[in-house]
Amino acid sequence: MIVYGSTMSPFVRKVMAFAAEKGITPELKNAGMGRGGPEFEEASPFRKMPGFRDPGADQGRDFCISDSTAIITYIEAKFPEPNLIPPDPIARARTVWYEEFADTMVCALGGKLFFNRFVAPKVLRIAGDESVAAAAEANELPPLLDYLEGVVPASGFLVEDRITLADLAVCSPFVNLDHLSVAIDPVRWPRTVAYVAAILARPSFAPIIAKERAIVAAMA
């Protein structure tokens, strides 16, 4: 199986961590930001990361799909154990909610910071809009942290007191905040800080993050 993109994207990182928790290691091919070529565009017609290919899986033809949720849904169905999207109706609904919260709220907030403080100046070599990043950090981030502080259980896992997609999705965008040295106050949000640190220390995330940190340091 092939994942197209860069783990600097929280969506790609989520897919790779999800696969790792399944004991699967897809090949990661750099794509996006003008890279990837026809193979990537076949998997992701709108050239959004991540794209995905499972060679020969569709009656001998390659199965291609894009969007992190679609890719994860496919992997979960093809490799059902260990389940990371619980079958219990309530637990499944909560897992889907937390992924949606992560994708549409945490990643959106993180994108404003990461694009304007890293992608624009470091990758595209254009000026980012610091006013957008600063406003997002000051006004949008605290309510999201307040929410997490109130819902993270003592077990350190959002659903069923075990690792699920919910944890992988919610914590993935925090890596981008860490790359920017965005400080999260451990006095105001102690449960959230401990929760994110523990999930990102898992073997599914840690090697990915170490490689990304080397890239970020090289581009400083």
Image: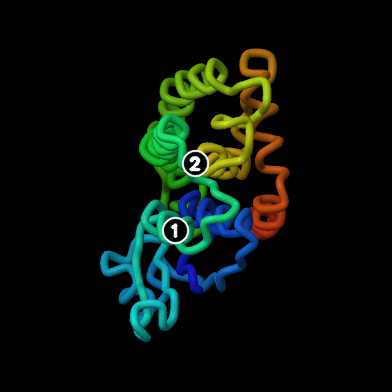
* Type of the residue with mark 2: Pro
Vertically, is 9 above or below 60?
Answer: above
Q: Residue at x 50, y 71 (%)?
A: 30
Number of other residues with Cα within 10 Å of mark 1, as a class: few under 14, some 14 to 19, many 20 or more: few
Extreme-bottom residue of the structure: 60
Q: CA distance from mark 2 to mark 1?
A: 12 Å
**Foreground residue among 126 and 219:** 219
Within-10-Å neighbours for mark 2: few <14, some 14–19, many 20+: some
Residue 85 seen from this side? yes
The residue under the point 48% across, 27% down is 137
> Residue sitting at 72 percent across and 52 percent down?
203
Asked if 105 appears above or below 87 in the picture, the reply is above
Residue annotated with mark 2: 86
Q: Using the rendered image of the protein, determine whether residue 130 is visible from the camera's viewpoint.
A: no
Circle 1 — which element? helix
Residue receiving disc 1: 77
Residue found at x 44% / y 47%: 115
Left or right: 40 as drawn, with respect to 164: left
Mark number for residue 53? none
**In the drawing, does residue 207 fall left or right of residue 40?**
right
Give how far across and how far down residue 149 sits, in percent: 57, 18
Amino acid type at circle 1 is Ala
